[in-house]
Image (cartoon, rainbow, N blue to C red):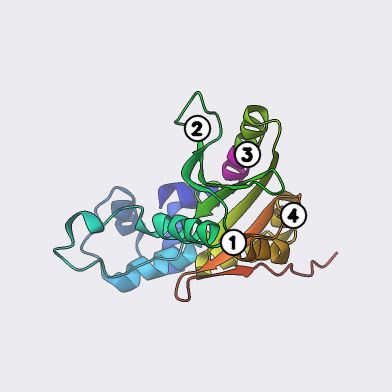
């Protein structure tokens, strides 16, 4: 809360006025003493800071090791690896981008032997730093190109189609277009049908309820 408030250059009094709290009570929140506050207050704070509160039920008790912290991320990886198998292309979980260093990897690596193309797929549930994520993907692309000079590298992001992620992309369409100029429709076909992937980096949505990849439609940006 404090970092989000300061990023907007708001004082405690300004944020308190927006959500109907006293300055002293809001100060308690920022010190971590807001656990007894009603849910409605947290919702109001999230909206005011443009960081909406996300609340969900946990997995059923008793699932043990099935309740994985990265379950949503693994779901996208599993889907991509199944598609790779269905289209007759070898897929690698946490595919290395620098063979000598196993800690450097892309979420899913797919090799198309017919076109000598390696697909570097990065899977995202949410973003902490969009710029850093783009830079990391570009670094992995360069590393993989150096490791396998005989293959063409093709990078794609597969992003969970949540309301928050769609809102982020809608807010910065020019940035997303510049970072991912490849045809989203072409990338969906490449991943689901096994066609040749576009030469430029792409962005594809993953719809969890239907377990499908869908294209990102480019927005018309006003001058």
Q: Is residue 26 visible?
A: yes
Along the line of sight, the residue nearer the viewer: 202 or 133:
202
Say which quarter of the image contains residue 138: top right
Report whether 59 appears left or right of 45: left
Report whether 57 appears left or right of 194: left
> Do the residues under discs 1 and 4 have CB atoms within 8 angstroms?
no
Q: Earlier in the sequence, mark 1 or mark 2?
A: 2
Residue at point 57% right, 53% down? 89
Q: Which residue is under mark 3?
A: 135
Q: Earlier in the sequence, mark 4 or mark 2?
A: 2
How many residues crowd around disc 2 within 10 Å: few (fewer than 14), some, or many (20 or more)?
some
Q: CA gap, disc 4 to disc 2?
A: 24 Å
Report whether 172 appears left or right of 51: right
Q: Earlier in the sequence, mark 1 or mark 4?
A: 1
Circle on res. 198 = 4
Q: Is residue 20 visible?
A: no
Residues drawn in magenta: 131-137
Along the line of sight, the residue nearer the viewer: 176 or 51:
176
Quarter of the image with the C terminus in it = bottom right
Q: Which residue is under mark 2?
A: 104
Along the line of sight, the residue nearer the viewer: 10 or 58:
58
Q: CA gap, disc 4 to disc 3?
A: 20 Å
Circle on res. 168 = 1
Compared to residue 117, the image places residue 146 above or below, namely: above
Label 4 residue SS: loop
Compared to residue 103, the image places residue 171 above or below, namely: below
Q: Is residue 133 magenta?
A: yes
Q: Is residue 139 magenta?
A: no
Q: Please identify the dominant SS of the magenta region.
A: helix
Question: In this rendering, which labeled residue sits more in front, label 1 or label 4?
Answer: 4
């Amino acid at each position: 809360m404090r970092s989000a408030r300061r990023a907007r250059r708001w004082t405690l009094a300004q944020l308190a006025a927006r959500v109907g709290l006293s300055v002293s009570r809001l100060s308690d929140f920022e010190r971590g003493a807001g656990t007894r506050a009603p849910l409605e207050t947290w919702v109001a704070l999230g909206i005011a800071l443009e960081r909406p509160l996300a609340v969900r039920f946990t997995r059923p008790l008793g699932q043990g090791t099935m309740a994985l912290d990265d379950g949503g991320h693994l779901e996208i990886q599993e889907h991509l690896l199944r598609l790779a198998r269905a289209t007759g292309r070898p897929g690698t979980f946490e595919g290395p981008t620098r063979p000598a260093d196993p800690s450097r990897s892309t979420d899913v690596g797919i090799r198309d032997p017919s076109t000598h193309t390696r697909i570097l797929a990065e899977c995202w549930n949410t973003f902490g730093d969009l710029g850093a994520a783009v830079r990391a993907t570009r670094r992995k692309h360069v590393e993989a190109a150096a490791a396998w000079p005989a293959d063409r590298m093709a990078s794609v992001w597969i992003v969970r189609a949540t309301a928050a992620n769609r809102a982020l992309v809608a807010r910065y369409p020019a940035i997303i277009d510049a970072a991912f100029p490849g045809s989203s429709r072409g990338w969906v076909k490449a991943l689901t049908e096994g066609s040749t992937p576009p030469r430029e980096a792409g962005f594809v949505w993953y719809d969890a309820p239907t377990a499908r990849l869908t294209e990102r439609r480019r927005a018309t940006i006003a001058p």
